[in-house]
Image (cartoon, helix red, strand yellow):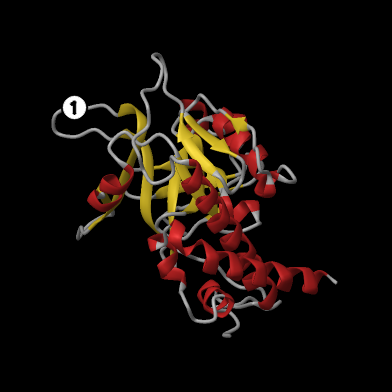
Amino acid sequence: MIIGVTHDTDGRVVQRPSVSTKVSIGLPPNGDRNHPTKLDHFAFLRKKNSANRVEWEADPELTRHYGEQCRELHIMLIDDDIENVFPSSFAWWTATERKCWGDRVTATRRTVEKPVGQPWTTWGSGCPELASGQCKPGGDLRFVLADFPRLGSVCRIHTCSYRSIRQIHSADTTPGNARSNSPGETQPPGDGSVVSGSNRSVKPHASGSPSSPAPNNGNGSAGSSGFNQLRNEFLAAARRVATTKKQAIGEVVEWASGGVFKYGDLGRMTESDVPKLQAATDLVTSALAGAAR
């Protein structure tokens, strides 16, 4: 434990995972077209090495695993704090940086005098960037792919739709969503994404014509669905134990399994691993019950 690095002054774990994957339902402009293209399925993007700026390219490994027409994902949220799971704000972005950001009451703007940012008083209806549409709302849903958990990094879906931000935020803060066995769907049509429950699945909403059948991505059969649910329940319980005991999630996973499997092994597990996954789930669940007493 290092106060100010791994933990804050109150002993809470500091989480700053990097975003290694973007899950998108649209493609940016390229040489063949000068406008974004909306999709009715997910595209998986990974960071591309660039000397000047962060760029993204198609992730062949995830595309191969989920298929090129993937319309549903099993995911795991990384925290119980909505601000860590779905941070949102108004922001004015230039081609190179986030110039100004705020919550529609207060704002911070980078200026020549203070490049790191200073309080901005011209806010609300008096802000020219807000009035012109350059300053827009934005929200980033951060999560772990249940099939591909990567230690220290997360995936991200971005939306700038008012309705999507409102509904995703509501879904993530509704009591009981994380444990629901038959969660309802919140469908924000602004950017087409759907969040089913809190730790279950995310899928895009196809506009216009009905969706074609989703490819087999390992989540389709009843057996696979039960296995994915068990794995999600284990990860949820392990994360709560890690938060309670102020330990790394990898340490908790290894403890719960008795060293049989590690955090990085979860994405490679199959239905044949259900017995040992169930045993580990029972152990962390009992640990949580004991802590509650």
Q: Residue furthest left?
A: 31
Seen as rendered, the residue at the extreme top is 208
Residue at 78% across, 73% down: 291
Task: Point out the residue furthest to the bottom here.
Answer: 1
- Front position in the image: 182 or 50: 182
- Residue 102 image offset from top left, x and y in percent: 58, 45
Q: Nearer the viewer, residue 156 or 111?
A: 156
Q: Quadrant of residue 147?
A: bottom left
Q: As shown in the figure, which amino acid type bears the numbered disc 1?
A: Arg
Instruction: Give the class, few, some or many, for how many residues have Cα within 10 Å of label 1's Cα (few <14, many ≥20).
Output: few
| Residue at x 50% of width, y 74% of height | 250
Residue 275: where, in percent of width, then height? 54, 65
User: Can residue 64 be seen in this snapshot?
Assistant: yes
In the displayed structure image, the side of residue 128 where residue 238 appears, left or right? right
Q: Residue at x 64, y 77 (%)?
A: 246
- Position of residue 120 in the picture relative to residue 204 (left or right): right
> Residue 12: where, in percent of width, then height?
66, 73
Residue 149 to residue 68: above or below: below
- The N terminus lies in which quarter of the figure? bottom right
Residue 113 shows in the view: no
Q: Circle 1 sits on which residue?
A: 33
